[in-house]
Amino acid sequence: MAHSAIRRVARVLAAAVILAGPIGKLTPAAAEKVLRIANMAEPESLDPHKTSTVPESNILRNLFEGLMVLDPSGNVAVGVAESFSISEDGLTYTFRLRGRAKWSNGEPVTAGDFVYSLRRIEDPKTRSQYAEVLYPIKNAQEVNTGKAALTELGVAAPDARTVEITLKAPTPYFLQLLTHTSSLPVNEKTVARFGEEWLKPGNMVSNGAYMLDDVKPNSHIRIVKNPNYWDAAKVTIDAVLFDPSEDSAAVLKRYRAGEFDILRDLPNDQLGWLRQNMPKELHIAPYAGVYFYAFNTTKPPFNDKRVRLALNMAINREILVERISAAGELPAYGFVPDGTANYTPRRVPWRTMSQSEREAAAQKLMSESGYGPNKPLQFQLSYNTSENHKRIAIALAAMWKKVNVSVELVNTEFKVHLNNMRVGNFQMGREGWIVDYNDAQGYLFLLQTSTKQQNFSRFSNPEYDRLMDEASFTADARKRAALLEQAEGILLEDLPVMPIYFYVSKSLVSTKVRGWQDNPLNAHYVRDLSLAD
């Protein structure tokens, strides 16, 4: 019988069983504790090596567990690895796996599973959207670009419980990379047996605190407690339902009606009311990410840097964050936010100009590019379904009218929008990036030529690439920071993207949810949470 069928039978029996107490008394079985999360998007995939978005990560960090994890405060902690050591030269990381670590089918998690998984994500055949994140591993880039065999990747299993990873250069943030979805292990036997069907309930074998139970597209994804998880005794929530609905206003109404325990995004126009009426449940906190628009630099009109600069200068970011987003976001005049470790972010030189001066400069640039009152610039602005994205797009379109621009807004659901961006089927498109580790490289790598899956702008600058490559080989923290700062300077000169604001996370968390801690990555593992009776 399939795993999912067994679990369904068990739940039915558990609901029906009456436990006998003293004579004359009957005690019902304990009710299943279910956490209901409004995840705000339909995941593209539940394959850790083929995903790229936050809604997917919210699910995957509960299904799978890597060598390292994040604690409730967002700090790096041991996961499947019970301990680790780093060589004096900073090139070799050795991890000792927990003896009790098992897959959901009861088989042990071995070092070979990690060797297989790290090779899999760098295998060109996998077509991973995140292979570049692990390029610090020796020969990772060569393997991923077909210039080296999988066996040449710098990862080995000296024995069943020891994973050895060799880097091409010291990488101070490497442990943070190992908390990312790209570093999660998958079960080789399951992938080999089922092919793409391994992602279905009943087929999937995972090693996290939960396992996949049910998937209903456009309805829900249900995960249930994994009894073979090494720390299962401390996991108190029996099941989690992830709802993909993207209409934040409708989802808020459902939350208030008691349908959800956690809401992962909020309509900006309701924040004032929520602050007054639901202060104990409202969580607004700094969030390590940037909200931006990407230009398709391969096609007119955005292959002209003057047009990109004009549109960047014409928007009033202060008005946007004060009146439109209104959650405490910071205007973005660069791509890397303040507070990034060992880094002094660059900012555009026209930041100190008044808005009227910027608009005048923008009009001049548009005129030089051939656009004006008699020939307005016309283009499509694409965004995914969200009242917040719509409000921002409408506000920007109004601002651009001052510089003779006419915008057509194009709205599609999340997966369609993401695919259009990926294949270049857009002119200007909404994007957002939540960094995976506290380092400037975590933002700036997006615009490298080699970052094919995430570089939606198709930006390619040889000097930018050279600086980024040199930074990846530089161990000295100051020299490395200087190289990255130069790279961001080039990015802000060419402006293949339009930074708009730096994020804050906006969540509603029911008072019956215990253990929730706001953190800069807004990463939360259900195993760290509990539900009050």
Image (spheres, rainbow, N blue to C red):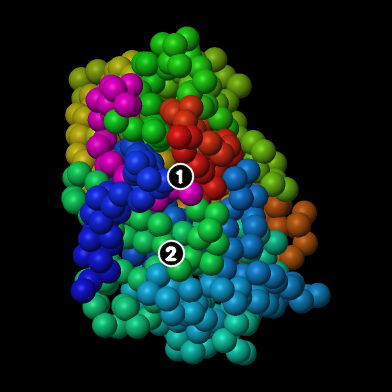
Q: Residue furthest front?
A: 23
Image quadrant where residue 409 sits: top left
The verdict on residue 100 being magenta is no
Q: Which residue is mark 1?
A: 433
Tell me the magenta residue range. Answer: 236-258
Q: Give percent across and percent down for residue 277.
A: 44, 11
Q: Going 26% across and 35% down the picture, which residue do you hit?
A: 246
Question: Is residue 417 visible to us here?
Answer: no
Q: Is residue 406 left or right of residue 91?
A: left
Q: Give percent across and percent down for residue 134.
A: 52, 68
Q: Which residue is mark 2?
A: 227
The image shows residue 156, relative to residue 436, as above or below, that is: below
Q: Give percent across and percent down for residue 90.
A: 74, 72
Q: Amino acid at mark 1?
A: Trp
Q: Going 65% across and 57% down the picture, which residue do you hit?
A: 77
Which of the pair 144/270 is nearer the observer? Answer: 270
- Of the numbered discs 1 and 2, the one sitting upstream in the chain is 2
Q: Is residue 214 left or right of residue 261?
A: left
The image shows residue 515, relative to residue 269, as above or below, that is: below
Whether residues under marks 1 and 2 lie with C-beta atoms below 8 angstroms apart, the answer is no
The verdict on residue 244 being magenta is yes
Q: Which quadrant, please, contains the N terminus?
A: bottom left
Image quadrant where residue 516 sits: top right
Q: Going 56% across and 73% down the picture, which residue do you hit?
A: 100
Q: Going 63% across and 43% down the picture, which residue do you hit?
A: 73
Which of the pair 242/289 is nearer the observer? Answer: 242
Q: Give percent across and percent down for residue 112.
A: 50, 84
Q: Is residue 326 left or right of residue 481?
A: left
